[in-house]
Image (cartoon, rainbow, N blue to C red):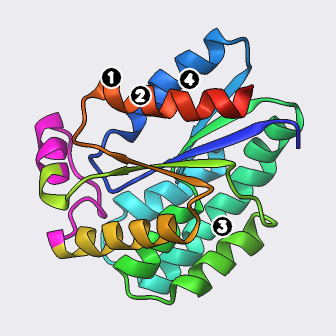
């Protein structure tokens, strides 16, 4: 497809949205059309699924959780991401299938290969050209989240051990696909992080 697909990943509190905002500004300034999105909830149907996943009272079983994320992603790709890429646009997504592999696979102790295969089936094999992984230890990430003053959702209320497992899952994914991942130390300044991201994206846009 003629477009460019970029995703941002990392545990909650690493600054994905901030960096995605700044990257959008950079890409638009270079004359490209940009579509911003996020998961779960990047579509009207996705908003309903997001409520079930993050704000519904009561537990959601790990397998049901994985299936709901896959359903959200399937509709998201079919109705928003793939059409934008086919139109030659740059898609910047806050989370994509690597989140499911890290959170539901590593975090929930499900089989990571099964979770990845499920999402690849749901999206007809679509992967980002670049995935930016903002890496940060869970304690620091939680402190940053708490400082925002926003009410944590169901996943954000998980224990530190859960986020440690998720972080390890992300780093394993990055090690297995170094050509797709850009791993950035999220303790760096906002400006330093953005500079590293822009340098890689500029190569892809050239």
Q: Nearer the viewer, mark 1 or mark 3?
A: 1
Q: Earlier in the sequence, mark 2 or mark 3?
A: 3
What is the distance, in whole Å, between disc 1 and disc 2 at their CAs?
5 Å
- Looking at the rendering, in which quadrant would you find the C terminus? top right
Of marks 2 and 3, the one in the foreground: 2
How far across and how far down the image is residue 28, in percent? 64, 15
Read off the residue under disc 4: 24
Task: Name the mark nearer the viewer: 3 or 4.
Answer: 4
Whole-number angstrom distance, CA of label 2 to CA of label 4: 11 Å
Q: Is residue 63 left or right of residue 148?
A: right
The residue identified by callout 3 is 71
Q: What residue did someone put label 1 on?
A: 191
Asked which secondary structure carries label 1, the reply is helix
- Residues under numbered marks 1 and 2 in contact, where contact means CB atoms less than 8 Å apart: yes
Local crowd size for mark 1, using a 10 Å CA cut-off: few (<14), some (14–19), many (≥20): few
In this orientation, does residue 60 appear? no
Figure check: 18 above or below 141: above
Residue at point 70% right, 58% down?
127
């Amino acid at each position: 497809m003629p477009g460019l697909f970029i995703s941002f990943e990392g545990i909650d509190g690493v600054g994905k949205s901030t960096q995605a905002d700044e990257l959008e500004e950079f890409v638009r300034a270079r004359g490209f059309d940009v579509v911003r999105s996020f998961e779960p909830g990047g579509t009207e149907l996705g908003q309903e699924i997001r409520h079930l996943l993050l704000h519904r009272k009561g537990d959601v079983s790990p397998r049901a959780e994985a299936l709901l994320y896959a359903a959200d992603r399937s509709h998201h790709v079919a109705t928003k991401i793939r059409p934008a890429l086919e139109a030659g646009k740059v898609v910047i997504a806050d989370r994509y299938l690597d989140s499911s592999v890290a959170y539901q696979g590593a975090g929930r102790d499900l089989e990571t290969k099964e979770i990845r295969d499920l999402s690849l089936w749901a999206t007809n094999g679509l992967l980002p050209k670049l995935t930016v992984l903002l890496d940060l230890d869970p304690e620091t990430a939680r402190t940053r989240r708490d400082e925002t003053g926003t009410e944590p959702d169901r996943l954000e209320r998980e224990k530190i051990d859960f986020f440690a497992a998720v972080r390890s899952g992300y780093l394993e994914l990055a090690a297995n696909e170094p050509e797709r991942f850009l791993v950035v130390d999220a303790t760096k300044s906002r400006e330093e992080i953005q500079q590293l991201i822009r340098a890689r994206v500029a190569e892809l846009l050239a």
